[in-house]
Every structure is written in C-alpha cells, then in structure tokens.
Amino acid sequence: MTRQAARGHAHLWFVGPALFLMFAILLLPIAVAAGLSVTDYGLGNLSNEFVGLQNYERIFTRSTYEKMFGATFRYVGVVVPVSVALGLGAALLIHSLGRMGDLYKTIYFLPVMAALIAMAIVWEFALHPTIGYVNRGLELSCGTVLERLSFFAEGCDRTFPLWLTDRDTAIWTVAFIGVWQGFGFNMVLYLAGLTGIPRELYHAAEMDGARSAWERFRLVTWPMLGPTTVFVVTISIIRSFQVFDMVEAFYPQGGGPSKSVYVMMFAIYEKGVQQNLMGIGAAITVVFLGFVMVLTLLQRRLIERRTHYV
C-alpha cells in the first residue's frame, strides 16, 4: 500500500519544482504588489498604515491619473492598429518578393533590434524645432516645391510643429516612433503565419473563381491568419502598455508637456522610485496587471472560439 501511494504521488516530484518557481517568480510578486497597494508604504518609513482602497480611489478620481489613462490609451489606440496593419502589409509584400525579400526583412527589423534609448536620442535630434532635419526638410519643401503650386502657396507660412514639446503633438509623435519601432516585429510574426498557409488552398481558391490577388487574400490569406492576428494584436497591446524607456529618454523630469505623455509605466516609475510612494505605485501596477490579464483572457477566448468553428 505504501509502495502504491508513493507511485501515486510520484508526479509531484516532477511538477513540484515548476509549481514552486511559478509561485516564487510570478504569483508571489503579484501578491506582494497587491498587499503594498492597500498601504502607504515607502522605503525607509518607520510606520506604514493600512489605507484600504484609498490608493485606487486616487487613481480613478484625480486629474493627474486621468491624464495617465488618457495618454496610455491614446498611445495604445494609435500604435496597435497602425503597427499591425503595417506589419501585415510589409509581410505580404516581402512574402511575394524573390531575392530582395531578405534585404527588406532585415531593414524593417532593424528598429526592433536597436536600443530604443539610443534611437530616442536620434529622434530627439531629428525632431528638434530648429536644427532637426524633419523641420528643416519641411522648410526646404515649403520654400521650393510647395510654393510652386498655387494651391499651397498661401498656406505655406513656415510655421512647423514643436513635435516633442507641444502638448498637442507630443503623444502623437511618441506614438509614431512607437509604430516605427514595433511594426517590424509584427512583420516577422505575420511572415511566420504566411509560411504556414498551404499553397493548395490558393490553387483551390483559383479553381473556384478567385482570380484576383484581393479575392485570394480575402478568401484564403486573411482567414488563415486569424490566430496569428489575434496573437499579434495581443502582443502589440501588451508591448504598447509597457512603453517606458522612450518616455524616460524624452521627458526624464516628467510625463511631457502638461503630462500629455504620462503613460502608466512612467507613472509607476515616478511614484514608486522617484517619489518613494510605493503604495500608489503598487496600485498602478495592479491596475496594469488587470489590463494585461483581461487581454490575455480575451486572446484565449478568441482562439478557442475560432478553433471550435474550424
């Protein structure tokens, strides 16, 4: 009986280390953050009081955190659809090429491999209002090409945006750089999905009357890329919520002009590290993890529903 009991519990010796690591690395930090989020804890404080849901009330009622949610969702709302669409378009173009495909693949993937802090410095110089080559190029175009066209002559007033220092353009400029940095990663994921589509499906669709490239894309490519698209969108959303280093490089002393680029990860860093407000920083972390959990569950539900229909 003892020998049978030992055999019945033998699987615990195999799953035990994995469960321990999952608890120590994943679940325990989340539990600690949740515990700190209901206190006014700060490093070095002699006494820390239980404040209940007060930190969460501050997050959802104060104007600073309203700007945080606004900046975060604006950034995610721009970066995710544009980077997914560009990634799909680049993947389709490269997949249809012959010898030059590897070259374009490398070029588009370079921003993903580059250190974003270093590239942020390059973009900061490029978008400088006076010496940056973006505004210099616009000025040159305004002085040569546009003024030759009577339609643009009156509107060419040589007044160009302060891309990173104007509260009306800062978040959109940062989102543009996020798209530039992220769509190459989506391109690689879509290329992997395209290589998994059987060629026989295209031959069958052509025999059924799908002659044009658009019809083959609509009837074969896009449906077969369904699981890949769900994964790409989920990963893009999570990566967009995690934006921090670019904001820190552009605005080390705050969340941009009038807190217009005050995204969630920067808020966690500012409250928890710079201001030593670990309680409110932990509360923002828990809210962030809640968003990620919801997105993960939605991804799993969409994949399971598609698998059920297939």
Image (spheres, rainbow, N blue to C red):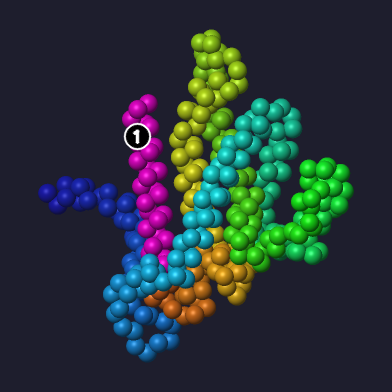
The answer to whether one can see residue 24 in this image is: no
Residue visible at 68% across and 43% down?
A: 108
Residue found farthest to the bottom: 46
Image quadrant assignment for residue 307: top left
Q: Position of residue 211 (x, y in %)?
A: 59, 14
Q: Is residue 81 above or below residue 192?
A: below
**Is 153 or 248 nearer to us in this picture?**
153
Give the SS element for disc 1. Answer: helix
Predominant SS along the magenta part: helix
In the image, taking residue 70 as reference, residue 121 lies left or right, namely right
Is residue 76 within the magenta segment? no
Image quadrant assignment for residue 13: bottom left
**Is 92 or 79 nearer to us in this picture?**
79
Residue visible at 82% across and 43% down?
A: 150
In the image, taking residue 100 as reference, residue 55 lies left or right, namely left
Range shown magenta: 283-310
Q: Position of residue 96 (x, y in %)?
A: 66, 27
Amino acid tagged 1: Arg
Q: Is residue 82 above or below residue 257?
A: above
Instruction: Say which residue label 1 marks.
Output: 305
Residue visible at 55% across and 50% down?
A: 78
